[in-house]
Amino acid sequence: MTFRAGKKNKSSLTGILTMYAVIFLLWTGYRIFFRLPEWVDEFVAKPILWISPLILFQKKLLTQMVKSLKIN
């Protein structure tokens, strides 16, 4: 018995992996170019850099779902 991933599963996985790659690159760039106190990293920068891409991805996904339902 083999598992066959549908087109929807592949596109969802691609979107999720892309999102995490973007987050990783943003965080890496931040850690290389900025040297701020630890409390700034933990309470300001990390939430902004980790939550912003998630919100944008969720907004894009929700927009696609609404368009697929043809609701204006």
Image (cartoon, rainbow, N blue to C red):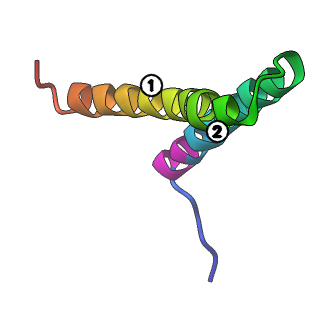
35 relative position to 58: left or right: right
Percent of width and height locating residue 61: 38, 33
Which residue is at 30% across, 25% downward?
Answer: 63
Residue at 46%, 47% in the rendered image = 8
Q: Farthest residue in the left direction?
A: 72
Q: Quadrant of residue 30?
A: top right
- Lower position in the chain sequence, tag 2 or tag 1: 2
Residue 33 lies left or right of residue 45; in this view the side is right
Residue neighbourhood size for the residue with mark 2, other residues' Cα within 10 Å, grouped as few (<14), some (14–19), many (≥20): few
> Which SS does the magenta portion mostly show?
helix
Q: Amino acid at mark 1?
A: Leu
- Badge number at residue 64: none
Locate residue 52, reporting x and y percent. Answer: 50, 26
At a point 75% along the width and 29% down the height, the residue shown is 37
Camera-side residue of 10 and 56: 56
Query: Badge 1 is on which residue?
Result: 56
70 up-or-down from 13: above or below: above
Classify mark 1: residues with Cα within 10 Å, few (<14), some (14-19) or many (20+). few
Provide the residue span drawn in magenta.
Answer: 7-12
Secondary structure under badge 2?
A: helix
Residue type highlighted by circle 2: Glu
Residue denoted by label 2: 42
Question: In the image, what residue occupies the spot 49% across and 35% down?
Answer: 54
Q: What is the distance, in whole Å, between disc 2 and disc 1 at their CAs?
A: 21 Å
Q: How far across and how far down the image is residue 10, in percent? A: 57, 47
Q: Nearer the viewer, mark 2 or mark 1?
A: 2
